[in-house]
Image (cartoon, helix red, strand yellow):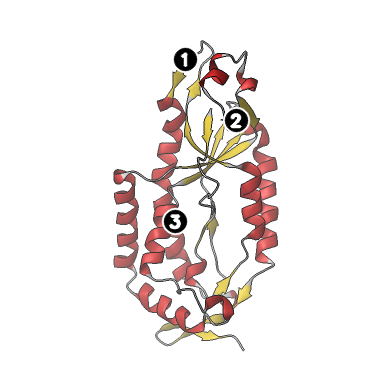
Amino acid sequence: MFSPFPSEIVPIGILNSTEDLVPVRIGTNATYKFEESLGYCISGVELTADGNGNTNGAKHGVFQLRFAMPEFVKNDYKSALEHTYSDGRYIDLSCGILVTTADIRVIKPKLNLDSFTSANDLDDISDLKEAIILNERAGPQLQDFADSKAKELFDEHPELEQRLLEIDNVLVGKEWENRSAPDLDTIKRSIGYSAERILIVNHKYLEKTIKNLEKAIVKDIKKEKVYGKVIDNIIGFEIIKSE
């Protein structure tokens, strides 16, 4: 049983992407619509058959996955730095997914205490869901861990900063007039964000959910904008503007 996200302004972006390391940007509209169709939640509690609740049970798997994601995304960035083919279109996309055999329920909005005390069953106070997106801010321990993964990436790949500077030179057009190109802080935040959003899916709907996500990603990829090319040279690589 999860609580709906407490604000209409939702921090969207379930996909982790390495596109900051290439002069290409893919769309986001279809993926965001996919996310909206599922809905964002916070705080889960496991309800047992005898009517008791267990907050630790619901969070244990999520806790493990949230600590795994920063390491996973760091490795994606390392992989992206080693590729220059396909005109710089090498982009890794990832998403943390927790599959459960339990029913997934979300508390209905605008309920008061009387709504719960007078409820005859769970359907009176909650909606059954195929999948939801759990969005929770990282605590100090998890944030420190994510930051340490970013530092490892920067220490192991000092060429990363130069690559970002070269990408800054090719990101042109109206969409970039009031935006900043990605920098080391952008990469650090991205690694941290990967620990905040987890897709939780009932096992019966896993295949359906994955297919819908894949369809959304394909639609967004078709909306790509190519600003430059990553090409090999004597010292490693360079990024040039598209003609």
User: Quick one: label 2, few (<14), some, or many (20+) residues within 10 Å?
Assistant: some
Q: State the mark number for residue 194.
A: none
Please tell me which residue is depicted at 57% across the width and 75% down the height of the picture: 175
Q: Is residue 181 visible?
A: yes
Residue 150 appears left or right of 212: left
Residue that label 2 marks: 108
Q: Secondary structure at mark 3?
A: helix
User: Quick one: label 3, few (<14), some, or many (20+) residues within 10 Å?
Assistant: many
Task: Inspect the image, locate mark 1, and give the three-letter code of the amino acid beneath it.
Answer: Asn
Residue that label 1 marks: 52
Q: Is residue 74 visible?
A: no
Task: Inspect the image, locate mark 3, and give the three-letter code of the amino acid beneath it.
Answer: Val
Please tell me which residue is depicted at 38% across the width and 73% down the height of the picture: 160
Image vertical order of residue 152 relative to residue 89, above or below: above
Q: Hey, which quadrant is residue 223 in on the image?
A: bottom right
Residue 37 appears left or right of 45: right
Please tell me which residue is depicted at 44% across the width and 63% down the height of the picture: 77
